[in-house]
Image (cartoon, rainbow, N blue to C red):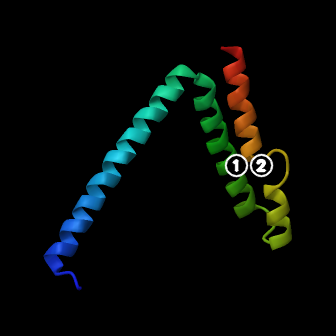
Amino acid sequence: MTLTNSQYDSIIRDYNRRQAAHRHLLEERMREVRRALPRVKEIDDEIASASVACARQMLLGDRDKTTASSTIMTPGCYYGNEHVIRGLFIGFNNE
C-alpha cells in the first residue's frame, strides 16, 4: 500500500505537531527543575562555558589530532556524565 502525497503530508504534520508539543513539555520541565534546583542551571552554564573554551583551545591550539584529543580529556575540558550526576546529587542532598 502506497501513500498519496496528501496522506504523507498529513502524517508529517501530525508528527511535527507532536514533536513540538513534546519539546514544549520538556522545556517546561527543565524550567521547573532549574527553579527547584538552581545548581542544575549552574551546571548547564559551566558545561556551556567549558565547551566553548575547549573548542577555542582546539581551534587555536595545535592542530595535531592527538593533541586535540588529549586536550578534550584534560580535567579543565572534560565534563563527563558522572560530574553532572554528582552535581545533581549534591544539590539534592543540600536541599
Q: Is residue 44 left or right of residue 35?
A: right
In the rendered image, residue 50, in percent from the top left (x then y), is placed at 70, 45
Q: Quadrant of residue 55?
A: bottom right
Task: Examine the rendering and report whether any part of residue 20 can be seen.
Answer: yes
The residue under label 2 is 77
In the rendered image, residue 79, in percent from the top left (x then y), is placed at 74, 46
Tell me, yes or no, whether the two marked residues, 2 and 1, touch with CB atoms within 8 Å: yes
Q: Residue furthest front?
A: 1
In the rendered image, residue 38, in percent from the top left (x then y), is placed at 58, 23
| Nearest-to-viewer mark from 2 and 1 | 2
- Residues 25 and 34: in front is 25
Which amino acid type is shown beneath numbered disc 1?
A: Ala
Q: Is residue 90 above or below residue 49?
A: above
Q: Which residue lies furthest to the left in this view?
A: 6
Q: Residue at x 46, y 26 (%)?
A: 32
The residue under label 1 is 53
The quadrant of the rendering that contains the N terminus is: bottom left
Q: Residue furthest top?
A: 95
The quadrant of the rendering that contains the C terminus is: top right
Which amino acid type is shown beneath numbered disc 2?
A: Cys
* Label 2 to label 1: alpha-carbon separation: 8 Å
Q: Is mark 1 on a helix, strand or loop?
A: helix
Number of marks drawn:
2
Task: Examine the rendering and report whether any part of residue 64 can be seen.
Answer: no
Q: In which quarter of the image is residue 58?
A: bottom right
Crowding at label 1, few (<14), some or many (≥20) Cα neighbours within 10 Å?
Answer: some
- Residues 65 and 44: in front is 44
Q: Residue at x 53, y 20 (%)?
A: 36
Q: Residue at x 35, y 42 (%)?
A: 24
| N-terminal label among 2 and 1 | 1
